[in-house]
């Protein structure tokens, strides 16, 4: 894949994750690792799907409202 195509793909992934996990700042570092930060919570992983899974786990039992704006039970 060309560099430009890779950048577009990463941008698409960032958009998807940002829409799915509101309240999190999400990005990809120069080391190639994906990361997400919210309050004192930090997740960092080389695989974007692992990041998505870990964010789902954190959001389900988090002290913050879920994506829908409701507090977890």
Image: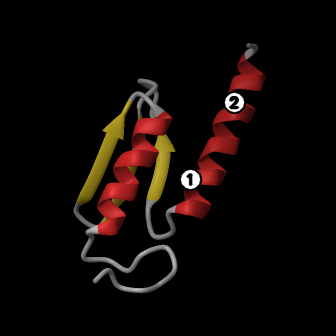
x, y percent for residue 29: 45, 34
Q: Residue at x 40, y 46 (%)?
A: 53
Question: Which mark, by number, is residue 55?
Answer: none
**Residue 72 sits in which quadrant?**
bottom left
Q: Is residue 60 above or below residue 53?
A: below
54 vs 5, left or right, is left
- Residue, disc 2: 7
Q: Farthest front residue?
A: 73
**Secondary structure under the numbered disc 1 in the rendered image:** helix
Look at the image and name its color scheme: secondary structure
Task: Say above or below: 39 vs 8.
Answer: below
Q: CA distance from mark 1 to mark 2?
A: 15 Å
Label 2 residue SS:
helix
Q: Residue at x 52, y 80 (%)?
A: 68
Query: Residue 56 in the image: x percent, y percent?
Result: 40, 57
Q: How many marks?
A: 2
Which residue is drawn at the image coordinates 77% and 24% (left, top)?
5
Dot 2: within a 10 Å radius of its alpha carbon, few (fewer than 14), some, or many (20 or more) residues?
Answer: few
Judge from the rendering whether residue 22 lies leftward or rightward of residue 62; answer left or right. Answer: right
Q: Would you identify the image quadrant in which residue 12 lies?
A: top right
Q: In the picture, which quadrant includes the C terminus? A: bottom left
Q: Position of residue 31 (x, y in %)?
A: 41, 24
Marks 1 and 2: which is nearer the front? Answer: 1
Give the residue at mark 1: 17
Point 40% across, 28% down: residue: 46
Q: Which one is in front, 2 or 61?
A: 61
């Amino acid at each position: 894949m060309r560099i430009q195509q890779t950048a577009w793909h990463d941008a698409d992934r960032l958009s998807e994750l940002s829409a799915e996990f509101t309240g999190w700042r999400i990005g990809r570092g120069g080391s190639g690792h994906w990361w997400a930060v919210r309050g004192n919570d930090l997740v960092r992983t080389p695989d974007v799907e692992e990041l998505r899974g870990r964010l789902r786990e954190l959001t389900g039992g988090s002290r913050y409202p879920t994506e829908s704006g409701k507090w977890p039970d």
